[in-house]
Amino acid sequence: MTAFYQKLDHAWTTNNSLLMVGLDPDTQRFPAELDNRPDAIFEFCRAIVDATAPYACGFKPQIAYFASQRAESQLEGLCDYIREKYPTLPIVLDAKRGDIGSTAEHYAREAFERYCADAVTVSPYLGYDSIAPYLSWSDKGVIILCRTSNAGGSDLQFLDVDGEPLYLRVATLVAEKWNRSGQCGMVVGATFPKELAAVRQRIGNEVPLLVPGIGAQGGDIQATVTAGGNTGGTGLMISSSRAILYASQGDDWREAAARVARETRDAINAFR
Ligand SMILES: O=c1ccn([C@@H]2O[C@H](COP(=O)(O)O)[C@@H](O)[C@H]2O)c(=O)[nH]1
């Protein structure tokens, strides 16, 4: 098993959790106690990480929330913090990169050298040579968009390709060709349980699925676990961001985040 799969497997088992806590820091929704702090983004995320780590199988910072606020250095600090304090929990950098190979080399360095993430999300749209630079980091995970959680994903992902939808073609390509070294995962939204089941059936047990769409987007937890889990009761990184991060904007925001993370972890486990 490659390093990323091993780390994920260990986190699933040790924390008895398939919950990936999403870190999407929106300063408009921060508690008042963080007003006017120059390091508010780091401090908010650090507190959320500490509150939810016992219930998580990893953390998924979404890079746009940091970059749009010129807070990349706070993201670097946050990744350092997670690595030092919770070295067994993988960091999945949600960046959804996609570009030609020479540029992809730099996106890969950004994810794996600058932020030292364990895995990064990428688009399959530019084909294998755009993914290869990420795969050359043999201890890292590469998580490829397959059936995204948004309704508009259907515009392209449901297009018919020789009798089957494009997203299933992507799933087959990743599982049968691109995943030679056992580093790949795929993104399939919890808002599309039928498609999640079709992907799991097509790819078998090995490839882990990153599944956003429960919580704020309304995806059903039971349907997600039943459709996407592998025969070992794992195989999923079920991600939730806003429902946990902004469970309360009062003084109890840390406790509220911990409570929702624990309840979500337990709700997932009830169907494994
Ligand atoms: O298909 C996708 C791929 C990625 N995302 C990301 O996941 C989180 C979802 O946040 P919630 O607050 O839990 O809805 C966010 O970072 C998205 O960029 C996705 O939603 N769907």
Image (cartoon, rainbow, N blue to C red):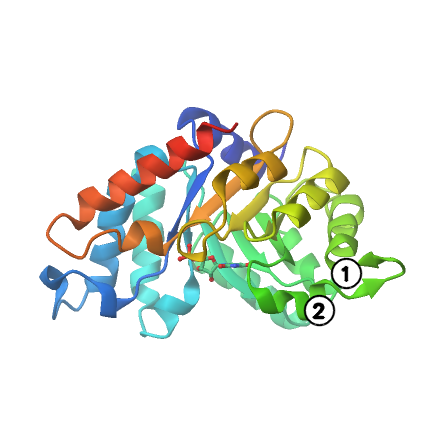
Q: Residues within 10 Å of mark 2 (few under 14, many from 20)?
A: few
The residue located at (40%, 56%) in the rendering is 216
Q: Can you see residue 28?
A: yes
Give the structural element (helix, strand or loop) at label 1.
helix
The residue located at (49%, 63%) in the rendering is 110
Q: Is residue 17 left or right of residue 44?
A: right
* Residue in the foreground of this view, choosing between 211 and 131: 211
Q: Is residue 198 left or right of residue 134?
A: right
Q: Is residue 206 left or right of residue 172?
A: left
Q: Is residue 161 left or right of residue 149?
A: right
The residue located at (55%, 36%) in the rendering is 225
Q: Residue 191: x percent and y percent? A: 55, 53
Q: Can you see residue 87?
A: no
* Residue in the foreground of this view, choosing between 103 and 207: 207
Q: Is residue 57 above or below residue 102?
A: above
Numbered circle sitting on residue 31: none
In the image, the residue with mark 1 has its CB under 8 Å from the nearest atom of ligand 1: no
- Give the mark nearest the N terminus, 1 or 2: 2
In the image, the residue with mark 2 has its CB under 8 Å from the nearest atom of ligand 1: no
Q: Residue 2: x percent and y percent? A: 62, 36
Give the structural element (helix, strand or loop) at label 2.
helix
* Disc 1 to disc 2: CB gap under 8 Å: yes
**Amino acid found under the numbered disc labelled 1:** Leu
> In the rendered image, which residue does mark 2 sit on?
156
> In the rendered image, which residue does mark 1 sit on?
166
